Image (cartoon, rainbow, N blue to C red):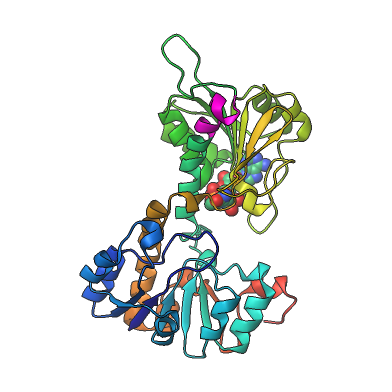
Amino acid sequence: MRISVPTEVKNNEYRVALTPAGVHDLVAAGHEVIVQRGAGEGSSMPDAEYQAAGATLLDDAAEVWGRAELLLKVKEPIAREYGHFRKDLVLFTYLHLAADRPLTDRLVTDGVTAIAYETVQLAGGGLPLLAPMSEVAGRLAPMVGASTLMRSAGGLGLLISGVPGTRPATVTVIGGGVAGANSAYIAAGMGADVTIFDTNIQRLRFLDDHFQGRVKTAASNPLDLDRAVVASDLVIGSVLIPGAKAPKLVTNDMVSRMRPGSVLVDIAVDQGGCFEDTHPTTHADPTFPVHGSIFYCVANMPGAVPNTSTSALTNATLPYIRQIARRGWKDALRSDAALAAGLNTVGGAVVNVGVATAHGLEL
Ligand code: NAD
């Protein structure tokens, strides 16, 4: 199959849909992989590595799109890419169509077969192509939290680990799923005193067993959460209620009672945030004050570490890409229910329930 990888064009997007190792894998399986020249630069993956892995490098985006049977991207196409759509194109990328009517309409009109990373779903409900980005954001959160706790960043001037004879930071992680567990792992590794709150007792059992006493667990209820947040130096918000906006678990009043210079990182900002005062920020201007505390609410945290994020994404997508390339998309989806759940538009129609419901369309 001819598989194409264009350069991402969305503002501040430095990831790319395939690593040189991914190219090597697909070329070894007999496929042709076309990569736009410079596509990997933002992820510190130079053209020379793609060429050595067997990619055909092309300069022109229109040609990269035009020659593709399967087109791999990271972010949803933006308006200036719509012109590349055509009926015999299979597109595999993050799409988030429920929030994007113009893109949905255009994919339908142009008859594109669009498979969305975010709706590929395992039988147990897990989202294998979202998990790597939650891992990245989760691991990054204590690091940005630790640096924001420094006096120079407006924090209270606390070293997250402390030193012998001084206290470490008290860290509360709200939501112990993929992101939260990864936050706790790094925060505990840096020597902080960490507690994870979750409403799911089964999940707390797993975390308790997993961390073997290095991290405390707590059932999430408003009273205990209030006490823990107010006593924390760093709060990390990582709750998710699938298909819903995040609940506002940290109120403005709670923040007003926190120690000046304490830090709150809201990973759930992309679902509206789980702190009352959250609003999305950018890597260029990531923090803002609330009372005496500092909020960090960057909506695309993985964008800070594109080298890692690109590798983690390819690790997760490659098994599905291999199947589509080897068997063709129809057969690949027929034999894998998780991948089939990824199909959002085909033959001029929306076929995903969530997307159809969001736009009031009939399935
Ligand atoms: P997940 O489903 O693995 O985990 C969410 C956890 O929250 C679950 O364990 C759930 O039981 C728990 N939860 C739900 N309601 C709760 C409550 N009231 N109190 C405590 N816990 C509660 O989700 P995830 O993959 O870890 O994602 C977490 C959030 O991070 C999502 O909003 C996701 O969109 C976001 N995210 C953001 C970025 C970013 O760059 N900002 C990157 C990746 C993911």
Tally the marks: 0
Q: Position of residue 83 (x, y in %)?
A: 55, 85
Q: Position of residue 48 (x, y in %)?
A: 25, 66
The reply to whether the magenta stretch includes residue 214 is no
Comparing 118 with 266, the one in front is 266
Q: Is residue 336 visible?
A: yes
Q: Position of residue 90 (x, y in %)?
A: 46, 82
Prevailing SS of the magenta stretch: helix
Quarter placement of the C terminus: bottom right
Quarter placement of the N terminus: bottom left
Comparing 115 with 264, the one in front is 264
Comparing 27 with 220, the one in front is 27
Q: Position of residue 32 (x, y in %)?
A: 28, 81
Q: Is residue 331 left or right of residue 87?
A: left
Q: Is residue 53 above or below residue 297?
A: below
The reply to whether the magenta stretch includes residue 152 is yes
Query: Residue pushed farthest right?
Result: 253
Q: Is residue 252 left or right of residue 234?
A: right
Q: Quadrant of residue 221?
A: top right
Q: Quadrant of residue 296?
A: top right
Q: Is residue 77 above or below residue 174?
A: below
Q: Is residue 48 above or below residue 176?
A: below
Q: Is residue 205 visible?
A: no
Query: Residue pushed farthest top?
Result: 165
Residue appearing at x 53%, y 64% in the figure = 118
Q: Is residue 44 above or below residue 170?
A: below
Residue appearing at x 69%, y 56% in the figure = 244
Q: Is residue 351 left or right of residue 223?
A: left
Residue appearing at x 27%, y 68% in the figure = 50
Numbered range of the magenta stretch: 145-155
Comparing 34 with 234, the one in front is 34
